[in-house]
Image (cartoon, rainbow, N blue to C red):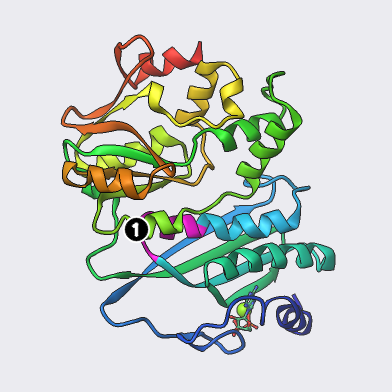
Amino acid sequence: MSARSEFSLIQHYFEQLTPQREDVLLGIGDDCALLQCPADHVVAVSIDTLVEGIHFFPDVDSEKLGHKSLAVGLSDLAAMGAKPAWFTLALTLPEVNNNWLKGFSSGLAKLAKQHNIQLVGGDTTRGPLTISIQVHGFVESQKALQRSGAQVGDMIYVTGSLGDAGAALQLQLQQWDDENLDNEDRLYLSQRLEQPTPRLSVGQNLLGLANAAIDISDGLLADLGHIVEKSGVGARLDLAKLPISAALSKINRTTAQQFALQSGDDYELCFTVSPQHFAEIEKQFKGLCTRIGMITDDKGIYFIDDNDNLIELTGAGYDHFSG
Ligand code: ADP
Ligand code: MG
């Protein structure tokens, strides 16, 4: 992009967009930003890229896209228990479309304000529409939640409900439908896909309570799979306990469970808690999270189905759902 149009675009849309924080010694406008990390904390860093046609539909509302682009990074910070501080934005645009930029920057700004995270720099280039956001947050040294901390005997919890975003995606792709879903349900599901809610306060409040955590971007089985693998343990899930939204409760139960286990993009948290902290969790996060199973010492993920059968979640287990 020509230096001039890049400069005015950044100035117009991005320079004053987000909260101005005191720990930003120098923000947008120089070769680097200069940032101050508080004493006794470390910086948690994560980057995500969204590519048009792969991670979002070309016709998606740009304000929602602005929200989601930042939400996925914030969800990574939440999973570590980190507090958001700064982000950078690499934007590749096919053209300067002011309407699009207005929506995108406003979706971004609203979520940034909500979590007091400041845009401190980025890069702007011309090409196929691609959005990369790198987020930075603080967490007390040695305190961050990691995938590797699960212990045998921990209870497994998840926030919110699972499977909504996956169902919305299938609806939008017209690969699946259910006549029991009314317009309100459909709206709810598409919001869950397009404007996920990163669980930052839950994540921060889990510090010192949870042994392991991850955010669910690829589906519960895949992401819980990362926890058990990194922790060298196994998991047993109680299918009847999977949190299903009111909307998905209207569809075929097996299909709803399948979405909850296997579909991604929900950006809920999955975490494990040792017995000494069960009571505290149930009290502090009442209504916010659900106990769905426990960590065991037999490697792999098993589940108890509706008939109280214990099934391993490999080949046959998956077949159980594909029927
Ligand atoms: P350089 O050529 O030194 O890389 P640029 O001309 O790319 O600098 O950027 C000028 C300033 O604008 C830098 O501070 C950079 O971080 C910021 N910037 C560029 N693009 C964006 C963007 N999409 N969002 C926020 N800041 C941006
Ligand atoms: Mg540059």
Disc 1 designates what residue?
A: 205
Q: Which secondary structure type mostly characterizes the magenta part of the structure? A: helix
- Is 275 drawn above or below residue 173 in the view shown? below
Residue at the image position 52 percent from the left and 85 percent from the top: 32
Q: How many marks?
A: 1
Residue 93 location (% of width, % of height): 73, 64
313 left or right, relative to 192: left
Residue at the image position 26 percent from the left and 28 percent from the top: 300
Quarter of the image for the N terminus: give it.
bottom right
Residue 83 location (% of width, % of height): 41, 67
Residue 264 location (% of width, % of height): 51, 38
- Is 29 drawn above or below residue 169 in the view shown? below
Q: Quadrant of residue 133?
A: bottom right
**Residue situated in front as seen by the camera: 250 or 1:** 250
Q: Quadrant of residue 152?
A: top left
Residue at the image position 75 percent from the left and 31 percent from the top: 183
Residues rendered magenta in the picture: 73-82
* Amino acid at the residue labelled 1: Asn
